[in-house]
Amino acid sequence: MAVKVLVVDDSSFFRRRVSEILEKDAGIEVIDFAVNGQEAVEKASKLRPDVITMDVEMPVLDGISAVKKIMQSNPTPILMFSSLTREGASATLDALDAGAVDFLPKKFEDIARNSEDATRALQTKVKEIGRKRVSRFTRPMTSPKPATPASPAAKPAPSSLRSTSTVSQPDRSFQRATPETTTQRSFKASGKSYKVVAIGTSTGGPVALQTILTQLPANFPHPILLIQHMPAAFTPAFAQRLNSLCKIKVKEAEQGDKLMPGVAYLAPGGKQMMVESRGGSKSLKVFEDDSPRITYKPCVDVTFASTAKAYSGDVLAIVLTGMGADGRDGSRMLKQVGATIWAQDEKTCVVYGMPQAVTAAGLSSESLALQDVALRINKELGIA
């Protein structure tokens, strides 16, 4: 069965281009177009597409507002198209916060090195997210922490939390739970000691990382390494947003950063992030990578491999939702030196690619629902 797509954009040229690219794949059918957000809301209700591609800036009703209305009335996997600018990054993160599952650059040349790869990337992403059931785990929104310095206790409570469930065929059911009605498992610490936590993710990762990091306490005892597949224009805004919502500190990683407890370091888009040992301290190496052999920049495998070398078995590594198998080889290297590997479970992944690769290889010792990951981390580290 073909994935049915509603293409939403106020540019007739872009609507036509997206349609032509998608319909080159026999597994995708563009069923209609919408020229503004309000029309998208109406057609989402009437046509019940499997996927909606959505522009951010449109007349009548903008893309972010349209996403909110669609997710309230007819939950549908939504793929945003965004400009690679500071403003575009902020708007796209707002759209993800509103319920969109992923995004792509609006300029196709920014997706991949050549048009064939860009075409394949768009088609693959639409098919992957088009067979997922949309579900949301939410908490009331809170205001970001103030820009002026404040004590850890003064930082605000976590913001909205979301996870996405999956099934093999499209399912339009929608579930909304509160923390009080969401069942959480009871966990027991293994007794193992750690010195660093490393988390790798891709499609669905921004919401997954927000879900986890906003539940970690200000006195978190170790540094955290975050590897999210994301364009260079987006990682500064994403790090800033996470920092405004979390009790821990979150920053975009920089060359020479010394790893400190209670700080999460987000790998910059378009670059690689590695851990180096210098004397008794650990620091970050952030660098441009022109190697054609490495698809992802940043790459989970690269960071995980360097973490295995720097910390040996004193690593808790977690692989979250994402397409492909990035993280599997790095997890294997970590496992060989005695590190602990966990993976997100299939039910709560937007795309069960990266966690599945790790789990299928026998590298993960636990498969966790997204809403349980932070609880499990805190329990394992003795801070729950």
Image: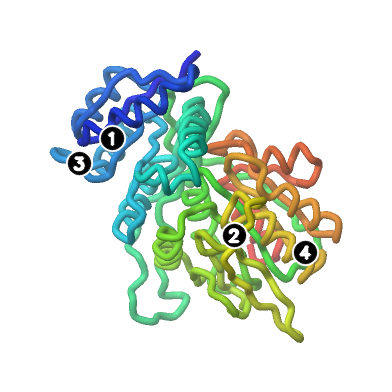
Q: Residue 254's spot in the image, x, y percent?
A: 53, 74
- Mark 3–mark 2 Cα distance, whole angstroms, equals 36 Å
What type is the residue that disc 1 sits on? Phe
| Extreme-bottom residue of the structure | 279
Circle 2 sits on which residue? 290
What type is the residue that disc 3 sits on? Met
For the C terminus, which image quadrant? bottom right
Is 163 positioned to the left or the right of 223 in the image?
left
- Mark 3–mark 4 Cα distance, whole angstroms, equals 47 Å
Q: Earlier in the sequence, mark 2 or mark 4?
A: 2
Circle 3 sits on which residue? 58
Circle 4 sits on which residue? 308
- Mark 1–mark 4 Cα distance, whole angstroms, equals 45 Å
Contact (Cβ within 8 Å) of mark 3 with mark 4: no
Q: Determine the secondary structure under disc 2.
A: loop
Look at 45% across and 64% down and name the residue there. 239
Q: Determine the secondary structure under disc 1.
A: helix
